Image (cartoon, helix red, strand yellow):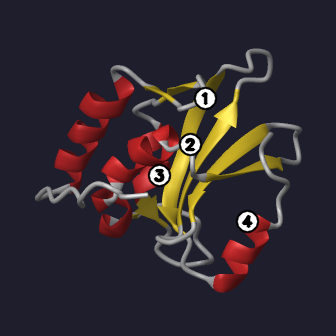
Amino acid sequence: MSLPPYLDLPTSDDYRHHYKETYCQTGVVTFDGIWVGFFPETFDHAFFRDSSRQTKDKAVFDRQRAERMPWIRALLLDPNAELYKRVMNAGKVRRIALDPTERYAVIIQMHPKRQNRARFITAYVVDSDSALKKMCANPRWT
């Protein structure tokens, strides 16, 4: 898969505006017909990181994640992406779309009653081998 170029904007506010304009207003329909909604309140979770492993505060803007924002749409539209199913503790079903070459993952959460609806959760570069192995240990999406 050929991913689009990085997005280079001056500030986190510019990235936030781009996210709202590009994703929140229309959503994305995946290659297999799932409408994925994007919400303004998800920006901080997706594009900020914790200042330390202990704080869990999402206080630091993560430019690496933000620069790859165009990859979200590209991966959701790619029929060749590796797809995995992860069931969370509360029974919520998440779909992981992975580009194994770039080690880039997009996570969406399926609507509990409408199989053709989901919401964007996050997207990031899987930077550790153990995290990638754990992700790929989930069952394949069918």
Q: Earlier in the sequence, mark 2 or mark 1?
A: 1
Callout 2 touching callout 1 (CB < 8 Å): yes
Amino acid type of the residue that numbered disc 4 sits on in the rendered structure: Met
Amino acid type of the residue that numbered disc 1 sits on in the rendered structure: Asp
Residue wearing tag 1: 32
Residue wearing tag 3: 46
Per the model, the C-alpha gap separating discs 3 and 4 is 17 Å
Q: Is residue 81 above or below residue 26?
A: below
Amino acid type of the residue that numbered disc 2 sits on in the rendered structure: Pro
Q: Earlier in the sequence, mark 3 or mark 4?
A: 3
Figure quadrant of residue 92: top right
Amino acid type of the residue that numbered disc 3 sits on in the rendered structure: Ala
Residue at image location 69% in from the left, 44% down from the top? 95
Position in image of residue 33 (x %, y %):
59, 22
Labelled disc at residue 59: none
Q: Quadrant of the C terminus?
A: top right
Residue wearing tag 4: 135
